[in-house]
Amino acid sequence: MSKKFKEIFADKGIFTIFAENFETDFAAFFPENTAVNLDGFTMFKNSEMFCNLTELNAPEIIKNLISVFLPSWRKINTLLNAEYNITRPISETKTKTGSVTRETSETNESTDFDKAFNSVDFIGNEKNENSNAGETVETYNLTETRNANENSNISENVLKELNLRKSQNLYNEISETILNEIILKVQ
């Protein structure tokens, strides 16, 4: 026989089980709430629903469910707590680093000749050769940033962000995920 949510979790709720078994994650997810407060709210919302658990196996099953979903909840927590400029969100940043090397070499050859005033022939005196070699190295760093919604309305972006933050919070995500697994569905 299935029991109601309030009968199974009267002594220890799902968030208390979460806090006892995953202290660090619970503290990161809910820094301003206690497990008792969250359990009370969950009990208020779901007390009359029937569960496919018993008082004996509920803590272990809840702990295992949390273990399975915890990696995705961590990612959600990271995204929800990320700080960025809502008025000019960055959609893409590209960084290029490189270098260009140029080698140069130059050889000059010159011969000095003397010619007397009334002579027809040139007389070679000395031959000079000059060689120059060099290398030029240029390095560059280029960072290109493109902003999303560059032409959109800032107040629309703020409203979208506020609505997203209201609808997507970890309490809803965690409680709905666990409850979907343990609540009996009437078909």
Image (spheres, helix red, strand yellow):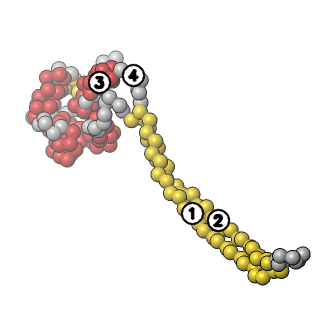
- Residue under pointer 3: 158
Give, as a three-letter code, the residue at label 2. Thr
Q: Secondary structure at mark 3?
A: helix
Residue that label 1 marks: 136
- Report if residue 13 is visible in the image: yes
Cα gap from disc 3 to disc 4, whole angstroms: 11 Å
Q: Are marks 2 and 4 in contact (CB under 8 Å)?
A: no
Q: Earlier in the sequence, mark 2 or mark 1?
A: 2
The answer to whether the residues at label 2 and label 1 have Cβ atoms under 8 Å apart is: yes
Q: Which residue is mark 2?
A: 104
Q: Residue 46 shows which numbered tag?
A: none
Residue 18 place in picture, x, y as percent: 19, 40
Name the residue tied to disc 4.
152
Q: Amino acid at mark 1?
A: Thr
**Between discs 1 and 4, the one toward the N terminus:** 1
Q: Earlier in the sequence, mark 3 or mark 2?
A: 2
Q: How far is disc 3 from disc 2 in space, using C-alphas?
A: 57 Å
Quadrant of the frame with the C terminus: top left
Work out how far the residue at label 1 is from the one at label 4, CA to CA, in angstroms.
Answer: 46 Å
- Name the residue type under label 3: Val
